[in-house]
Every structure is written in C-alpha cells, then in structure tokens.
Amino acid sequence: MTKAKTYRPRIADKLLKRKLKGKGAVLVEGAKWCGKTTTAEQICNSVLYMSEPEKRDQNIQLARLNPKLLLRGEKPRLIDEWQVAPILWDAIRFEADHSRELGLFVLTGSSVPPDMHEVIHSGTGRFGWLKMRPMSLWESGESTGEVSLSELFDGKTDIAGISNLDLERIAFITCRGGWPLAVDMDDDIALDQAFDYVAAVEKRDIQQADGIERDPTRVHRLLRSYSRHQGSQATFSSIKDDLIKNEGESFDTDTVASYINALKRIFVIEDVEAWNPNLRSKTAIRTSDTRYFSDPSIATASLGIGPADLISDLNTFGLIFETLCMRDLRIYADSLNGSVYHFRDKNGLECDAVIHLRDGRYGLIEIKLGGENLINQGVSTLLTLAEKIDTDKMKSPSFLMVLTAVGDYAYRREDGVLVVPVGCLRD
C-alpha cells in the first residue's frame, strides 16, 4: 500500500493510534474530503477501497456471501467507505470478538448508512469511534501553536505569542476552509474547492444520506439559509420563515428538519449542544443547539461570497469566523478528551464556547474578530458568567479567553482574562 509522500500530520493521528490500542476496530467518520482515508492509510498496513468503481459491485456481493475474504490482509486493515456494505459491520465485529488481538481494523465513512436493519450487533466493547473534521489552523501550519489549550488546563496561563495572520488572511482562510488538498494549492485555485464541495453536496452527496431524491436547487437554498444562521439558536420554524422571506422557497417545518438531518448524516452540519452548569441563581438556561457547519467555507461557498465580501461586511464575517473557531476548538478538545458546548440563559447572557473535559475542568471562550471594544465586550461576558457559576458544586473555570481573528499578540490581561489570536492556538 502506497502512503502519502507529503502528509501533513493531523491531531487525529495520535487519537487513532490510541483507540486502536484499546479496541478491535475503530470507525473514523467525517465529511468527505476532510482527510479520513489519508490519515488511516498512514497507520494501516493493508486497505480495501469499498467504493473503487471497478470492484464496487463485487465488494458488495462478497460482503454478503463471503465477508471474511474482504477482511484478509495485514493488520491493521483499512476498510474505506464501509457504509457501501453495512453488513460488513457484523463480520468485523465477529473477527474482533474472536481474536486475542486489538487494532485489527480501521473503518472510514463519510455518511451514516441509511439502512442498518441487517446489522445485528452495536459493536459495543469492540468498536471505537473517532470524528474527523477539516484541518485546524494548527494542522494546516497557519497557527504558530504558541498557546496550548492543554497547558492552559494545566494552569500555565502566563501566555505569550505572536500571530502571523492579518484580517485579510483570516478572511481568505475562512473562505478556503481546512480541506487538506486545498491548503497547499495556489490561493485562487484553493478558493474554488469549497464551491465544488458544496455543489457535490447539493447534486449527489445529500442523496446518499437517506436515499431520498432532493432537488439540488432546494438544497442550495436551504444551505444559504443555514449559512445566515451560523452561530444562532435558530429553530426549524425560523429557518423555514427565512427561506420564505429570502429565498422564495415554501418549505414546511418537517421538510426543513429532514434536509438538516440529512446534512448531519453526511457531516456537513455539526451543531453545538448547550452547556448546563451549576449556577448560584435559578436562572433558566436555554437548551437549543447552536447552528454551525463543519467548516466555515461551506457557509461562504453557499452564500457565493469570497474574502473581499467578508472584509466589506464585518457582521457576516464575525458570524462565519465563529464557525472557523468552533471547528478548531472541537478538534483541539477531542485531543484533550473534551467536548465543546455553548451557553445562553433566559436573560441573554451568552458564552460562545465552553470546552469541558471529562475530569470536570472547563474553560470559557468568547469569540471576537478583534479590536479593543469587542475584546472588552467579550471580557465583560466572561467575568459575568464566571461570577454566576456555583463553585461549591463545580470547579472554577481553568481559564477565561477571548479568541480573536486579529491582534498581533497573545497575552494575559491584568484581570486574568486571556486574549488569544486564533493564529496562536493549538491543542
């Protein structure tokens, strides 16, 4: 098996190696073109490409008649796009169950299989799961990595760093996205890639989510509406109203829900759940998910805009930049056995991102384009929320951070709040 000659290391590399030490098989899921197969190829010693055109039908037939034949090969063995034949799941689970070895198989999938009725076993105890996303700025080489989230959680908050990214470059990176092949392309060619990705989602990929044929024009309009709601807790009903108002499209609420669920199944949409801390007061906490794509370039391509458009509309830029930050924070949090949440209470107090680790440590993050006024707003929000947390029932936050698009330096303010350009951050 030929491995990539110029492979950019991914945070998922170490996560996959770790999971293979504890499970017979690991399923790596994520959007098409985010690098799942290439990452798995670096670790695996043999590979079966289930969707290889000349062998696809044969592979599907063998999966039913003689699955063990497909599983032969040096271990770990990569089963790429396993969802082409979901029945393979039980064969892999059986082999993992009856072997004394671990780390036998890596499965990759760019969609959740629409039909799992033939699969008998869940895989509990034998399978591990790993989510991959497009590249973070640390992985693409555009963050200096001078501020480590891991070190912040360990109490090392006397930070210092210098970002190399100005507003124009951040605008470009937002529109290009973290697609691995695009990262090393010339800038003008790289910007085309997200448009091609969105076109593929509209014309073909969404059909693979649940087997339902959908009009690409209607998918496009839904994506445009979802783009306008990045970083909000918009309901299906409000998205429906937006479609009627701005797209002239008469979706009903159930149809909006079905389209969004299909896009989630192919990892285009990745919303963020609400955080529910212990507060001193009995203030009600909003529990709606916050709307995000898995990469900011999906939003810009859906809207048909580029870097110059973001520079001329800083409000839109700020919302889509938030999507970039959430992508990176989720990648970094995975490395730390953590999850990313959003907080909002009934009085409108809102925190853009909360990274919560398994051991109960957490950090509060506000996301701003930059500038003294916006940074001060973020600081005020963080200090207000930190004051409301009942530290008799849970830990104090490990850090408070304003994460910015621009600003030359990463530093700690006198009030203890960290100001960090995204171009300095890493896991």
Image (spheres, rainbow, N blue to C red):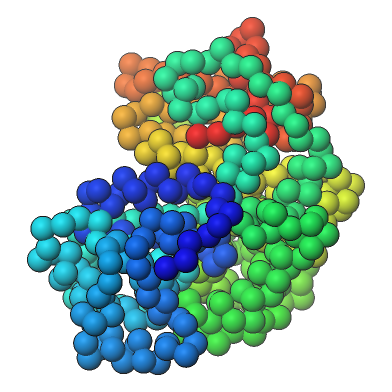
In percent of the image, x 47 and y 22: which residue is there?
151
Residue 245 appears anywhere in the view: no
Q: Position of residue 322 (x, y in %)?
A: 66, 43
Q: Which one is nearer the viewer's eye here, 256 or 85?
A: 85
Q: Which one is nearer the viewer's eye here, 299 or 425?
A: 425
How many numbered markers are drawn? 0
Q: Position of residue 339 (x, y in %)?
A: 43, 41
Q: Position of residue 298 (x, y in %)?
A: 67, 61
Residue 208 appears anywhere in the view: yes
| Residue 249, quarter of the rendered image | bottom right
337 vs 303: above or below = above
In percent of the image, x 66 and y 21: which residue is there?
161
| Residue 32, quarter of the rendered image | bottom right
| Residue 236, quarter of the rendered image | bottom right
260 vs 227: above or below = below
Q: Is residue 31 left or right of residue 191?
A: left
Q: Which one is nearer the viewer's eye here, 45 or 154?
A: 45
In percent of the image, x 55 and y 34: which residue is there?
426
216 vs 157: above or below = below
